[in-house]
Image (cartoon, rainbow, N blue to C red):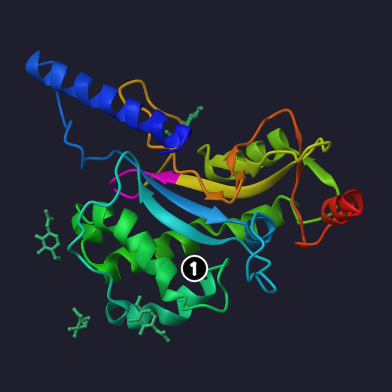
Amino acid sequence: MNPAKLHYWILGCFSMALCCWCTSEKFIYSDSHPHTWKKLYLAHHWPVTVCKMSANDCEDPPKYWTIHGLWPDKTEDCNRTWHFNVTEIKDLMSDMRHCWPDVLHSSLNRTQFWKHEWDKHGTCAATLEILNSQKKYFGKALELYKLVDLNSCLLKAGIKPSSSYYQMTAIKEALTRFYGVTPKIQCLPPEEGEKAQTIGQIEFCFTKQLQLRNCTTLKDESNPVQAHLKLGTEELSVCNDNLPTYYPSEVQDHKQSHKSLKNF
Ligand SMILES: *[C@@H]1O[C@H](CO)[C@@H](O)[C@H](O)[C@H]1NC(C)=O
Ligand SMILES: *[C@@H]1O[C@H](CO)[C@@H](O)[C@H](O)[C@H]1NC(C)=O
Ligand SMILES: *[C@@H]1O[C@H](CO)[C@@H](O)[C@H](O)[C@H]1NC(C)=O
Ligand SMILES: *[C@@H]1O[C@H](CO)[C@@H](O)[C@H](O)[C@H]1NC(C)=O
């Protein structure tokens, strides 16, 4: 077990102990079941950044934000006997390929990515009647993605991939103004010797009624399970409001060439 995992494990035991304690003290007023959750994250990722994070077979990543997943907070892998079956979503296939591609393994069997998302998150989301089949879960995620239409929002706000930097607060304010809710924005932290972070993921939060809501945690909610995207040694984390932010148009940029120069 690596130290990070151990940390979560200890934290998990601690919260479980806490839960038992509150249950026995009758402090729990509503749902404390491990499979209950409060909100859904619709995570979009920027394929160029995802490709930068991993020397994988990312060939010519899409130049638009694609779906990473639709994730209930606070829970994972809720039903290990409910197997992914690609036949169930065959009617969604053309949208799935366009909106929800496996960016990292473009030449591999792309259904593995969808299987992973279903196993880990879909089986938990399925406690809602509107999401209680694979067709409903993937279909609703596609619907929300089209509704949010992040790509055109960013374009309208004049935020385009480029080689210059954005202020994180400007991106955040533009999105909050447009949607009326605050999304969660994740970045690749600056590399050594760099000052800019790289935007990688934008997550919108929804209530169980599938209404947009703020991603900020309300007072009566505990913090969500941190859904980090970790690839090799690089990891996305919540963007720093005070750092210049890079929104790259190409996987190979000045940073990469700079790095390879340094290596010689
Ligand atoms: C898990 O999924 C299977 C297959 O869909 C279903 O029969 C079973 O009732 C589910 N179990 C729970 C606890 O939801
Ligand atoms: C997959 O889904 C299809 C369509 O619903 C069904 O006919 C088939 O039996 C399923 N396959 C498995 C292995 O469950
Ligand atoms: C892709 O993987 C799925 C299982 O997730 C399998 O059913 C399917 O046959 C595979 N397709 C190819 C082309 O390998
Ligand atoms: C989101 O939070 C802002 C303040 O941070 C508030 O003005 C707004 O009403 C909230 N929106 C929703 C849908 O809760």
In the rendered image, the residue lying farthest to the top is 25
Q: Is residue 31 in view?
A: yes
Instruction: Judge whether residue 51 is colored magenta.
Output: no
By secondary structure, the bulk of the magenta-drawn segment is best described as: loop
Coordinates of residue 14 in the picture (x, y in percent): 28, 22
Q: Tell me the kind of residue under disc 1.
A: Trp
Q: Is residue 134 above or below residue 196?
A: below
Question: Tag count in the figure?
Answer: 1
User: Badge 1 local density, few (<14 within 10 Å), some, or many (20+)?
Assistant: many
- Please say whether residue 140 is visible from this viewpoint: no
Name the residue located 66 percent from the left edge and 31 percent from the top edge: 240
Mark 1 lies on a secondary structure that is: loop
Assign the C terminus to one quadrant of the image: bottom right
Q: Is residue 42 left or right of residue 14?
A: right
Q: Residue at x 33, y 55 (%)?
A: 120
How far across and down, in percent of the image, does residue 181 sit?
A: 50, 38
| Label 1 CB less than 8 angstroms from ligand 3 | no
Q: Is residue 82 left or right of residue 94?
A: left
| Figure check: 97 above or below 140 | below
Q: Nearer the viewer, residue 101 or 80?
A: 80
Q: Is residue 198 left or right of residue 86?
A: right
Q: Position of residue 162 (x, y in %)?
A: 82, 55
Query: Can you give x and y, in whole percent of width and height, for residue 29 in the image?
Result: 14, 22
Q: Quadrant of residue 175?
A: top right
The residue pinned by badge 1 equals 100
Would you place residue 127 above or below residue 169 in this image? Answer: below
Quadrant where the N terminus sits is: top left
Quarter occupied by residue 117: bottom left
Residue span colored magenta: 205-210
Viewer-nearest residue: 132 or 152:
132
